[in-house]
Amino acid sequence: MHCLQLANLASLLAQRGHAIAYREDAICPRALTDYWVACRSRSDLWHQAMARNRQAHQAGDWVALRRWWDDHLVVLQEILVSEMLSRVVACLAAASDQQFRSAPICSKTWSEEDAIDGPLPDADDWAIDPWGEIVVGGDSVSGYSMSHDKERDASSSGEASGTSSKDSTAAGSGKQDLSPITDAIQSSHLDARNRVQFLMLHNRGCRVTDAVRLNRLRMTVERWTDALLGRMPVRLSTAMKYGFDKELIRSYADETAELGPTIGYSAAAALLNASMMNTLSRHVDRTPALPQANRRVAQSVIKMLRPNLFDDWGELKSLRQHRIECDHRHSELDGKTPTAWHMDGDDSGDRGDAGAKDSLQRWYLA
């Protein structure tokens, strides 16, 4: 698998990040172990390759250094390009943790006592503000304050039942351990990226053309990473944490907020992805450096997505589909049928509203 396919996967996760972060069980915690192992194994291979450069430099063998650059230039390109995926996954995990701590309304154990200010919010009243807080009924909710309230309620109920508050708190925060793992992976990738920049700066046996090519690739990756993070409907502070240029991220966030969830957003996302792949392909070789390691990383990332995120055709569900399913479960808990037609007025017979029926027929015939 080529590193460009990892960049394409990062673009897909960034475009569907709002639907993935909407579900607090979207990322499988067990799959994070496979993701950590795959990234760790690939990182070890990277460091072994760069260790051979250091050994040749210490020995003063400039012929070996020149040969090393000819053989491992594609490895350095892969380190720079694949960082896009690690940053997007880390940002997505952080957004998922924030969503779970703030308003896990799609949880099967949700009850009206867990509501913020009264009964369960409707699907239309609930949304993830793409560039701000979690929004329920038009009011922003602070994630940390609500998580502290839930932990306090869990600890008080644990003491009342004779259980320890420590166990109840651990059980309540079992799904909040995603971002530390992904942040550690991203930090390890950042260390490899810094080593690549060190080799570019000191020019140990590297041609000037190769150094210039790597530097252009580095700037291209940084710009497109900020574009992906800026278009992710997560908190702006979260996107800035994993990006490079905060002002560029903010500009992409403002542009995406103006488009909204319309057809124009889908078209802009498709054009953005095509432009990104075209630009990156100009600065990398066609031959992959570590295809098996990249494949294992991509497989582990895909396994992090639970099956309930996909529809019957194998496509990732949109945010609207998740809201409809969530509203359907809430209606079943309340004893209502979400697909039933509810007529206004005192007449509860089968006649319905004649005006509504005529308008429906006119719409159908048109």
Image: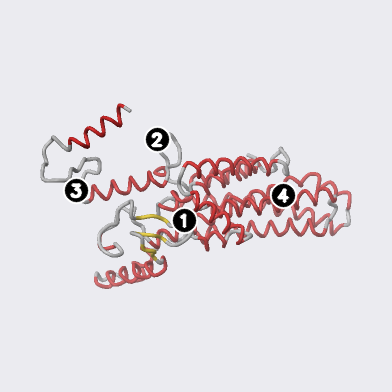
Give the numbered dot on residue 139: none
Residue bearing the label numbered 2: 312
Task: For mark 1, give the secondary structure.
Answer: loop
The answer to whether the residues at label 3 and label 4 have Cβ atoms under 8 Å apart is no
Point 33% across, 28% down: residue: 366
Report how many numbered discs are placed on residues in the image: 4
* Nearest-to-viewer mark from 1 and 2: 1
Image: 263 above or below 17: above
Amino acid carrying mark 3 in the image = Gly
Image point 59% across, 44% down: which residue? 272
CA gap between label 1 and label 4 equals 29 Å
Quote the CA–CA distance across marks 3 and 4: 57 Å
Q: Amino acid at mark 4?
A: Leu
Q: Residue at x 63, y 60 (%)?
A: 245
1 and 3 marks in contact (CB < 8 Å): no
Q: Nearer the viewer, residue 69 or 132?
A: 132
User: Mark 1 vs mark 3: which is more N-terminal?
Assistant: 1
In the rendered image, which residue does mark 4 sit on?
Answer: 217
Say which quadrant the N terminus sits in: top right
N-terminal label among 1 and 2: 1
Q: Which residue is mark 1?
A: 130
Q: Position of residue 19 (x, y in %)?
A: 43, 48
Q: Badge 1, how many Cα within 10 Å: few under 14, some, many 20+?
A: many
Q: Which residue is mark 3?
A: 335
Disc 1 and disc 4 in contact, CB within 8 angstroms: no
- Given the image, on which type of amino acid does mark 2 rest? Asp
Q: CA distance from mark 2 to mark 3?
A: 27 Å
Q: Earlier in the sequence, mark 1 or mark 4?
A: 1
Q: Earlier in the sequence, mark 2 or mark 3?
A: 2
Classed neighbour count for the residue bearing mark 3: other residues with Cα under 10 Å, few (<14), some (14–19), many (≥20): few
Mark 2 surroundings: few (<14), some (14-19) or many (≥20) residues within 10 A: few
